[in-house]
Image (tube, coloured by chain):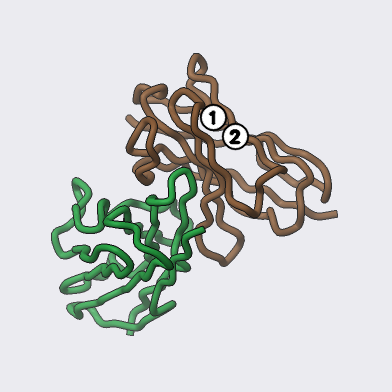
Chain colours: A brown, B green
Amino acid sequence: ELQLVESGGGLVQPGRSLRLSCAASGFRFDDYAMHWVRQAPGKGLEWVSGISWKSGIIGYADSVKGRFTISRDNAKNSLYLQMNSLRAEDTALYYCARDTSSNIFGGMDVWGQGTTVTVSS
Amino acid sequence: DIQMTQSPSSLSASVGDRVTITCRASQGIRNDLGWYQQKPGKAPKRLIYAASSLQSGVPSRFSGSGSGTEFTLTINSLQPEDFATYYCLQYNSHPHLTFGGGTKVEIK
């Protein structure tokens, strides 16, 4: 069974850091690009960041560029999102999602259930 | 960056109706567009890729069309399980992706 399980969310103060993780199973992780997508409470979907299969291609939304860092460990079948200098507007449910391609982003076809990040003092 | 404008933001329809949702791209994106369905409390589910290709397992009442800057998702004969929020996603501006703002389909 294809599965993505996110973890690492929680309540954090503005300006602090948090690291999200996504554990993949049921498919060959290193064959696919991966993404983080978030959804603020009551709002729409926002693509956050994506990374190609060998980490050679990485992209970020303007809203997180310079603060968030995406990475992956293919040996551990895991995707990460290091989030620094967090702001209240980063409060959201963060989804991990698999791309349909390895090196050219082609959209997501498998999603996790998400992990919630709340930024508040 | 490419902006995706989705309309309408919400609509009310009845079971059996035909529903059309539109996404417009701020610049041409060929057919690099997908459509997603999201139900409350659930992760999104891909319905359409490459603007008009139906994802495996998705009912044939869903269809997509368009190319360039204007795209349409059509649901023929709306079913009770289709009441949800729908999003378009452009993936032409690799490595930057953009979702549309979403369309909530509600029961009339």
Specify the label residue A47 is tagged with: none
Where residue A14 appears, as percent x and y from the top left, is 82, 50
In the rendered image, which residue does mark 1 sit on?
Answer: A79
State if disc 2 and disc 1 touch (CB < 8 Å): yes
Q: Residue furthest left?
A: B60
Q: What is the distance, in whole Å, between disc 1 and disc 2 at their CAs?
A: 8 Å
Going from N to C along the chain, the mark reached first, 1 or 2, is 2
Where residue B26 appears, as percent x and y from the top left, is 43, 68
User: From the viewer's perspective, is A26 left or right of A52?
Assistant: left
User: From the viewer's perspective, is A113 left or right of A110?
Assistant: right
Residue B105 drawn above or below residue B45: below
Where residue B76 appears, as percent x and y from the top left, is 16, 72
| Secondary element type, mark 2 | strand
Where residue A71 appears, as percent x and y from the top left, is 58, 29
- Subunit of label 1: A
Specify the label residue A70 is tagged with: 2
Which residue appears at 53% of the width and 56% of the height? A46
Q: Which quadrant of the view contains residue A81?
A: top right
User: From the viewer's perspective, is A91 left or right of B8?
Assistant: right
State which quarter of the image contains the N terminus of chain A: top left
Q: Residues within 10 Å of mark 2 (few under 14, many from 20)?
A: many
